[in-house]
Image: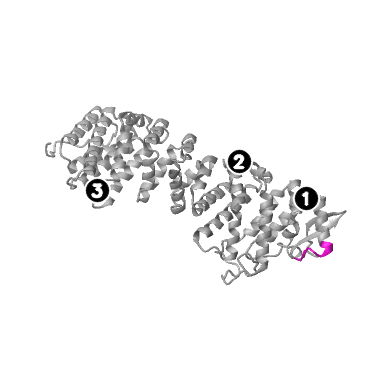
């Protein structure tokens, strides 16, 4: 092969008019021919840089002929063959840094060529750039180098090219997915470089659609979805992974269930936090979370809710046990949000035994807290000093209040559930939680809310509360301190605000 000579000229572009010309295209082909026929040298990098720069101009991009891209493809293919030889054989590595520079510049040119150009996207796809680029990205991660930093630049540029190629082009999206899923996409999402992972997350998000999401839920592919969720937890500033989870993952009940069963409790908390945030969006009525996901989470809460009780007994000796309890707490938060006036989830009022489970759990937590001083005991310490009173770091802050909130939600305009709470002796239990508790901010307000929903249009529940008051079994002093009166009128019990002068 001939030594590098100076006759390979960079593409020259008129500064006053960046539009490509026939001569420009001929110059490109001639310059690329030099790269193909000579030993690599720094001048070749400059040739590619000039081409990359000119491709930033829309007029030039629109006028570049297919022959120029065909020549670029040959350069990229040669580099791929050379790097493959380095990876598979014990060869002199001194030429590798220059090969990596050339590879990065090829990827930059490809990336720029695709900007707002469906024509160039299609051209590059038809010429085979996707296959060779993906092969190179795989090789870059296996090439033996003294410094792994050398691969970051071509790796990032190559992934950016895939992203630009996929935007707005379904055929390119499908090809990238078909040729890289699941193994290579997982590798790119696991690279030890934050920028590369961010770009890979963008490609992943861009390629996704409903069909591909269902592929993710299959057992052999679930590890890719779990990696995305891991990134949501460990690198929350990577917006693309969060968007992938909220815009795609949470809308598939099959994927949610598959992920949940394969996750650690720590990872489940992350999933539930994202779901909670999605439910709280302003347009939450259109959050896209299917009913089957809500049913699955309600059942998961019922099955695992007993784990919270271990926090009081001291048996939460490991982080895994603690995380299991935190999962239950997160499930409760999600269920409270789902049943807070979101019509599409109010069918949970009829979810088998959900109300019963919640009332019984409240009864257990309340009894444990009164039996001895522990994490569930009521406190009047608002200093957040951490000396046995309220602590902002306590895992069960507001847990009992949210149990009462869920009971109130499930009983809203639902006579069957109102009656069920009465039969479970839940009304005196809720009344006993009307006192201010620094471990459960707003518990008094949630208790009042629940009592209101339990009494509304329910004569039997009203009579029960009246009987409790006459027997002295219910203490209304806390309600009065909060500015409310329980008043009997015409045989009915009303909860009403106190007059300021009373």
- Sequence-wise, which precedes: disc 1 or disc 2? 2
- Sequence-wise, which precedes: disc 1 or disc 3? 3
Name the one closer to the observer, 325 or 382. 325
Q: For the residues carrying marks 1 and 2, which lies nearer the camera in this image?
A: 2
- Sequence-wise, which precedes: disc 2 or disc 3? 3
Is label 1 in contact with label 3 (beta carbons under 8 Å)? no
Marks 1 and 3, how far apart at CA: 73 Å
**Image quadrant assignment for residue 380:** bottom right
**Image quadrant assignment for residue 19:** top left
**Pointer 1 local density, CA inside 10 Å: few below 14, some 14–19, many at least 20:** many
Pointer 1 residue: 456
Direction from residue 183 to residue 254 in the image, left or right: right
Q: What secondary structure is found at the residue carrying circle 2? A: helix
Q: Quadrant of the N terminus?
A: top left
Q: How is the image coloured?
A: one colour
Q: What secondary structure is found at the residue carrying circle 3? A: loop
Q: Quadrant of the C terminus?
A: bottom right
Where in the figure is residue 420, as x and y percent of width and height?
74, 50
Residue 442 visible: no
Name the one closer to the observer, 294 or 237. 294
Give the residues drawn in magenta, as a range.
Answer: 469-477
Residue 197 visible: yes
Pointer 2 residue: 291
Where in the figure is residue 66, as x and y percent of width and height?
29, 28
Is label 2 in contact with label 3 (beta carbons under 8 Å)? no
Pointer 3 residue: 144
Determine whether 411 is above or below 311 in the image.
Answer: above
Where in the figure is residue 307, as x and y percent of width and height?
58, 57
Q: Residue at x 24, y 27 (%)?
A: 22
Q: Residue furthest front?
A: 315
């Amino acid at each position: 092969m001939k030594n590098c000579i100076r006759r390979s000229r960079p593409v020259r572009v008129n500064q006053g008019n960046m539009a490509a010309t026939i001569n420009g295209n001929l110059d490109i082909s001639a310059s690329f021919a030099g790269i193909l026929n000579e030993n690599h040298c720094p001048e070749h990098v400059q040739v590619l840089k000039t081409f990359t720069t000119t491709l930033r101009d829309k007029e030039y991009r629109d006028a570049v002929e297919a022959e120029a891209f065909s020549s670029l493809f040959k350069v990229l293919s040669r580099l791929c063959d050379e790097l493959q030889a380095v990876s598979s054989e014990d060869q002199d590595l001194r030429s590798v840094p220059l090969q990596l520079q050339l590879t990065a510049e090829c990827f930059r040119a490809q990336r720029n060529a695709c900007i707002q150009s469906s024509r160039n996207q299609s051209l590059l796809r038809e010429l085979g750039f996707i296959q060779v680029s993906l092969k190179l990205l795989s090789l870059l991660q296996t090439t033996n180098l003294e410094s792994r930093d050398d691969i970051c630049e071509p790796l990032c540029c190559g992934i950016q090219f895939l992203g630009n190629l996929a935007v707005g082009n379904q055929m390119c999206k499908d090809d990238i997915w078909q040729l890289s899923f699941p193994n290579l996409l997982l590798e790119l999402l696991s690279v030890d470089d934050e920028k590369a992972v961010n770009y890979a997350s963008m490609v992943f998000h861009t390629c996704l659609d409903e069909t591909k999401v269902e592929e993710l839920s299959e057992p052999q592919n679930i590890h890719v979805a779990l990696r995305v969720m891991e990134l949501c937890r460990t690198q929350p500033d990577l917006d693309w992974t969060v968007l992938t989870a909220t815009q795609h993952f949470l809308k598939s009940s099959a994927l949610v269930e598959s992920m949940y069963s394969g996750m650690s409790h720590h990872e489940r908390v992350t999933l539930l936090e994202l779901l909670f945030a999605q439910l709280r969006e302003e347009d939450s009525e259109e959050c896209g979370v299917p009913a089957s996901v809500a049913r699955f989470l309600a059942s998961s809460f019922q099955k695992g809710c007993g784990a919270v009780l271990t926090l009081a007994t001291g048996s939460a000796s490991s982080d895994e046990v603690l995380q299991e309890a935190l999962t239950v707490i997160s499930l409760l938060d999600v269920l409270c949000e789902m049943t807070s006036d979101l019509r599409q989830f109010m069918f949970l009022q009829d979810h088998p035994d959900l109300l019963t489970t919640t009332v019984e759990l409240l009864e257990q937590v309340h009894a444990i807290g009164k039996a001895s001083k522990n994490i569930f005991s009521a406190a009047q310490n608002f200093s957040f000093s951490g000396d046995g009173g309220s602590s902002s770091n306590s895992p069960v802050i507001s847990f009992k209040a949210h149990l009462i909130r869920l009971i109130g939600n499930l009983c809203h305009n639902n006579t069957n559930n109102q009656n069920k709470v009465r039969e479970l002796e839940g009304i005196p239990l809720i009344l006993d939680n009307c006192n201010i508790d620094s471990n459960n901010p707003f518990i008094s307000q949630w208790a009042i809310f629940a009592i209101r929903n339990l009494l509304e249009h329910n004569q039997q529940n009203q009579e029960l509360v009246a009987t409790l008051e006459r027997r002295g079994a219910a203490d209304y002093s806390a309600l009065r301190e909060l500015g409310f009166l329980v008043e009997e009128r015409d045989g009915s019990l009303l909860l009403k605000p106190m007059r300021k002068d009373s």
